[in-house]
Image: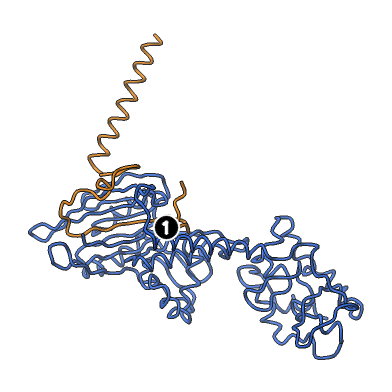
Amino acid sequence: MPTLLVDSGGAFVNDRSTHGEPRYDALVRNEWILKAYSRYNFDAMNLSVNELASIAKFLKKDEFASHTAKLPILTRLVSANFTAESAKLNAPQPFIVRGIVAADGKPVRVAFIGLSEMTKDAPAGVKITDPIAAAIRILPEARSNADIVIGLSHLSAVDAVRLAREVAGFDVILTGTGEMFTPPIKTTSTLIAFTQYETRFLGELRFYRDEQGKFTVRERYISMDIGVGEEAEALELVAQAREGRVNAVRSMQEGVPAGNRPRWDAATYKPVAGEAPVFISSQSCYPCHAEQYLKWANSKHAKAADVLVVKKEESDASCLQCHGTGVQKAGDVPQLLSVQCEQCHGAGSLHAIKPAKGYGKVADVKANCTACHNPQTSPNFDLQAAWLKIKH
Amino acid sequence: MKLMLVILMAAFLAFLFTGRSGAFQQQTEIAGVDAPMSERLGADDKPSLVVHFTGDIHGSLEPCG
């Protein structure tokens, strides 16, 4: 049977940090979803609220071509009510038309219009507008380009019914509500079929074309329990995704084992020729830079990890990217708790052994500060005022 | 009296169950848990095309139970 395969949204896990950014392990898991959907040639993927935080990374204009080369599903994302407020982001297309040769040998064009529930919690640079207004705006164009129009949505049952009533022209509205099992609803002209919880049942729409070329549709659901069997390649992909997720969680827990580092003593430490400097903590700065040390010790930077300790997240490397010290480039594992002298000045072991001018100059104060004090984490951050507090 | 209540309750539940089940099956074909593969694939009633749809997998490629 000629078949199309689509996702109505909620494909991503939406685990976010305290500051609202996607957690590293969530990003890894979600990238595996994109890999799987690319591998199995999904024809369309709707963006729901769940996807917004993670998908922004893949929609950056300057990286979009390289991402789509690896993850072709990115070219088949749909959302009619996603607005990119940031000029740096690509907005997904409002609808996609997939052409297919039907069983009778004649071509059929199926339009999928993406629609998401609204949210007040959209990440920076993204806005979700009213789905019904978006559908009213987009549907005529989709209709003129397709034989069948399907709303691919993530809406409550009530909103899906409202959509069907207020926007004429949908043949089918597919929607995910996150509920266990919701039976379909038929209005006079539109079938509303619900994606079942976690796709424990695969949804199927069968379209039949009569002699006048008019389509009718009926829906089926297929249990995806163990009786379906496993495909070897899919099993391998699932195993790789599991390993990626485990490694991501492990890497997040590789931050500072409290009280366990650094073990460093200027008197006994013998650097090897060509060795890169290591992080040695603000305690090592004190003998020569007591005034600066005291200013730091009484600053919020010196206590930046306290909040993590309270939450038992002091080993979470993703939090320590900003609440710890030892990150000089993305992906570094933090070495020290709280924001210590070396977070701005660089790893200082070699300077401590052989003090000399040239170490520690901060080339770009603004870039250094705003790497962590960004609009999400510090919406009221005033660089000038903050700089005056720590200037030394 | 107790027996009457039990009978009434049983009749009410039977009505609820058969009523919902019957209406549901009229609308939607479901190949349920442990259904044989032939039932999952369904009869070949010559559709022009098929759309399979998924959703809400929440970052997991694995079944959760």
Is residue A49 visible to the viewer in this orientation of the structure? no
**Which residue, as the protein is rendered here, is positioned at the far bottom?**
A357
Q: Which colour scheme is used?
A: by chain
Q: In which quarter of the image is the C terminus of chain A?
A: bottom right
Chain drawn in blue: A
Q: The orange chain is which one?
A: B
Q: Which residue lies furthest to the front in this view?
A: A232
A46 on left or right of A363: left
Q: Is residue B25 left or right of residue A317?
A: left
| Above or below A238: residue A180 | above
Total marks placed: 1
Question: Which image quarter: residue B62?
Answer: bottom left
In percent of the image, x 41 and y 72: which residue is there? A71
Q: In this view, does A84 lie above or below A212?
A: below
**Left or right: A120 with respect to A111?**
right
Q: What residue is pinned by disc 1? A: A117
Instruction: Tell me what residue is drawn at x 43 percent, y 75 percent.
Output: A70
Q: In which quarter of the image is the N terminus of chain A?
A: bottom left
Question: Please, what secondary structure does the residue beneath circle 1 have?
Answer: loop
Looking at the picture, how far across and down is residue A159, in whole percent?
37, 52
Q: How crowded is mark 1: few (under 14 residues within 10 Å), some or many (20 or more)?
A: many
Residue A208 vs residue A169, the one in the foreground:
A208
Instruction: Tell me if residue A166 comes above or below residue A290 in the rendering.
Output: above
Tell me where residue A335 appears, x and y as whole percent.
74, 70
Q: Is residue A171 visible?
A: yes
Which of B35 and A300 lies nearest the eye of the viewer?
Answer: B35
Camera-side residue: A325 or A86? A325
Chain letter, disc 1 residue: A
- Identity, as a three-letter code, of the amino acid under mark 1: Glu
Residue A126, horizontal then vertical, whole percent: 48, 69
Q: Which residue lies furthest to the left in this view?
A: A211
Coordinates of residue A352 in the picture (x, y in percent): 85, 82
